[in-house]
Image (spheres, rainbow, N blue to C red):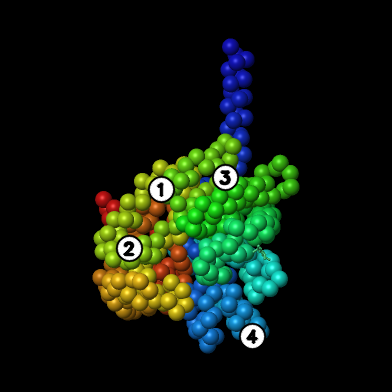
Amino acid sequence: MLFSLLRALALSASFLSSVYAITPGFPYGSQKVRGVNLGGWLVLEPWITPSLFDSTGNSAIIDEWTFGQLQDRNKALAALQNHWDTWITESDFAAIAAAGLNHVRLPIGYWAFEVGPGEPFIQGQLPYLSKAVTWARNHNLKLIVDLHGAPGSQNGFDNSGQKKSFPQWHSNQTNIDRTNAIIKRIASMFRDQTSTVPIIAPLNEPAGFDGQAVLDATRQYWFDSYGNIRFPFGTSQQSNTVVLIHDAFQPLSFWNGFMQPPNWEGVAMDTHIYQIFSVQENQMSQSQHIQAACNKASELSSFDLWTIVGEWTPAATDCAKYLNGRGVGSRFDGSFPGSTRVGSCTGQTGKASSFSSSYKTFLRQFWEAQTISYEKGAGWIQWTWKAEQADEWSYQAGLANGWIPQNPTSRQFPNICG
Ligand SMILES: *[C@@H]1O[C@H](CO)[C@@H](O)[C@H](O)[C@H]1NC(C)=O
């Protein structure tokens, strides 16, 4: 009797220790993630810094690939160097911490680590990754390293480094092998610093909407990434690093049962919530946008992995200049091919000084609705900290102009979701 009790205790203790072999550098699941992305810094995005693209004088430069390919390389390098030195500095980390946030998510492209023959990407980002980690540590922020662009492109978006009509990452094993090698490197760089880099996102937004082949490659890549990130010591020793997989634009239910404990530990799900990349969503009223955000709560709270909304925005239109690509118009004002005009973009994007007080009130309501709803999951990371000409997207501008509170838990509209 006593023996069997002891045995039962020993068994449950070993079961518990296997469930909790990982001690993450942030208590995901018990404390909410509140954070902001450092978009447009180590991976260029035309809409975040249109001036970098406009000043090339070449309208064929539409992404970081063509930025390196279609202009003088020394000129491109100088522009990038200046951008890396100025777009994000330690004072941004100080301001992010002072705003009560606990995470930054830092997009970086594969080309920071390795450039293949014939690829025109310009390197030099890695010292800034190191600085960012130091700055995060200095200001007690957690930093998510987010591989935002993979060889061949995982989604064809300009923000993968290379805009193309169909992604080619998933269909080419060389591309996948190169990506795995980079994740191994990232995991080993940060395996002993998990109190500052508790979590690695091995691939941003693989284009699951492009079909089963992308989903199959992505699923296998999450398995590979788990091995690479959770076992970075070359032995059976596990790291404390959490793996942040992305839902590949599928409903969370698509991933039900995927990578569950006790066989899998330290896995979190990243989902991105935008209401602006279709004509229909641009036609929604302000109250419909708010309701749609509130409606996300049940899916987020019931999914079986820690679920972080790793990208979202208070913007309710696709009006920001170059948001749909350099030289491409917006659905909201009907200048996007095949769209139907909803209204003028004037007053919807640009500098906050051009925003009406009722629009700013809506931004506050939409911000609160989203953070209330997304905290029913494991938390949220807004896209993005800064944007040159699109204050509706900018956390920094929201703080300065009052639609984002100085303390992210204070509410003017606590009952916005009912
Ligand atoms: C696969 O990708 C590599 C670059 O990673 C490229 O050199 C090679 O040509 C590609 N193979 C095919 C069949 O497209």
Q: Which residue is mark 2?
A: 281
Q: Considering the numbered disc 2 on the image, is that residue within a helix, a strand or a loop?
A: helix
Q: Considering the numbered disc 3 on the image, is that residue within a helix, a strand or a loop?
A: loop
Q: Are marks 3 and 1 in contact (CB under 8 Å)?
A: no
Mark 3 packing: few (<14 Cα in 10 Å), some, or many (20+)? Answer: many
Closer-to-camera residue (282/300): 282
Q: Mark 1 vs mark 4: give the one in front.
A: 4
Label 1, label 4: how far apart the Cα atoms are: 47 Å
Q: Which residue is mark 4?
A: 72
* Quarter of the view holding residue 389: bottom left
Q: Position of residue 369 (x, y in %)?
A: 33, 57
Does ligand 1 reach within 8 Å of label 3's beta carbon? Answer: no
Q: Mark 3 vs mark 4: give the one in front.
A: 4
Q: Mark 2 vs mark 3: give the one in front.
A: 2
Question: Which of marks 1 and 2 precedes in the sequence?
Answer: 2
Label 2, label 3: how far apart the Cα atoms are: 34 Å
Instruction: Decide: is 413 above or below 75.
Output: above
Label 3, label 4: how far apart the Cα atoms are: 45 Å
Does ligand 1 reach within 8 Å of label 4's beta carbon? Answer: no
Q: Which disc number belongs to residue 266?
A: 3
Q: Position of residue 293 (x, y in %)?
A: 34, 56
Q: Considering the numbered disc 4 on the image, is that residue within a helix, a strand or a loop?
A: loop
Question: Which of marks 4 and 2 precedes in the sequence?
Answer: 4
Residue placed at 59% from the left, 74% from the top? 65
Give the residue furthest to the top.
Answer: 1
Label 3, label 1: how far apart the Cα atoms are: 18 Å
